[in-house]
Image (cartoon, rainbow, N blue to C red):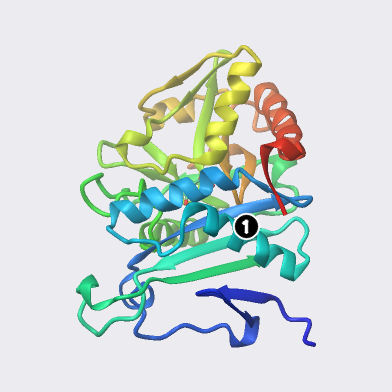
Amino acid sequence: MSNELLIYIDGKYYPRSQAKISVYDHGFLYGDGVFEGIREYNGVVFKLKEHIDRLFSSAHAITLKIPLTKEEMIQAVVETLRKNKMKDSYIRLVVSRGVGDLGLDPRKCPKPTIVIITDTISIRAADAKEVGVTTMFSWVRRNRVDATSQEIKSLNYLNSVLAKIEANACGVDEALCLESNGCLAEGVGENVFIVKNGELMTPPTSTGALAGITAEVVKGLVAKLGLKLTVTNLTPFMIFNADEAFFTGTAMEMVPIREVNKRQIGTGKPGPITKRLMAEFQKVIEDPTQGTKV
Ligand code: PMP
């Protein structure tokens, strides 16, 4: 028996080195597909139902009919975790249009491809939660909602990749993405919150950011702590002058932002409201009622 991770492809399990899909798959040829990134904490898949709902909404938006029910998809994720005896994993669930011909017409793809990978992920420095990250507005605008909007969690992530390339080139930890009206949309794979005078603000998802599941959890924590949150357009000026700012996302979790385009945010250290919310967030992810047991 090999020690390799087992990867689910269309109902079968393959060792990682043999887990392959066709080069005619339209997910590969055209980025035609949808995906989710999900975390499992201590044997509980955090907000799995919410991720599956979003996956099906993304698929619906691109007229991709997933050949499993939501319940079957949940079971497939749980079964893949069981097979791999994983603890504290990061799950990548991908549904592509499937194998077709070299034209882009989705009608040529009779069967979607489903892939489930249960692995780990590392997208930030070890001390990022304690010291915060540096960021910059990249020149790459988010697509309008009538283009390949980030509201759809599709395999078209070049918009985010370009922004990340810019941050890398400038020696900055993460990129911030503006929408076409010049206001903040989100990070490359995170939502953003700021704090000003004790109140929180975050951009609306209606302008092309993904409706983050972590952001939704954090919104609940803001309410629990009796803090005020406004969903509103955030200009670069408002962000430069925020007292605190932080990212939320499945892979990133909650991470303070300490700098934007060389402007220090607040004291340059994680602020008190960010720290309180991070502590509350930690409690939620450790709460077994917040997800699906493996
Ligand atoms: N925006 C984008 C573009 C993302 O890819 C992600 C990661 N899924 C997020 C925001 C954060 O969403 P969530 O909290 O659901 O992971």
Q: Secondary structure at mark 1?
A: loop
Left or right, 161 with respect to 79, comes to left
Residue 195 found in image quarter: top right
Whether residue 64 appears in this view of the structure is yes
Pinpoint residue 151: horizontal percent, then vertical percent. Answer: 36, 46
Give the quadrant of the C terminus: bottom right
Q: Residues within 10 Å of mark 1 (few under 14, many from 20)?
A: few
What type is the residue that disc 1 sits on?
A: Ile
Q: Residue placed at 21% from the left, 73% from the top? A: 107
Please give the residue where the numbered disc 1 appears in the rendered image: 123
Q: Quadrant of the N terminus?
A: bottom right
Residue 133 shown left or right of residue 182 in the figure: right
Depicted 66 relative to depicted 250: above or below: below
Residue ID at (32%, 52%): 60
Q: Give me the residue at 39% from left, 32% from top.
A: 236
- Asked whether residue 171 is in view, the answer is no
How far across and how far down the image is residue 90, in percent?
65, 58
| Left or right for 262, reference 112 | right
Q: Identify which residue, 140 or 32, lies in the foreground.
A: 32
Count the marks: how many?
Answer: 1
Where does residue 100 sit, x and y in percent of width and height?
29, 81
- From the viewer's side, name the closer residue of 240 and 113: 113
Q: Is residue 142 left or right of residue 3?
A: left
Q: Quadrant of residue 102?
A: bottom left
Residue 203 at x, y percent in the picture: 40, 31
Looking at the image, residue 197 lies above or below residue 260: above
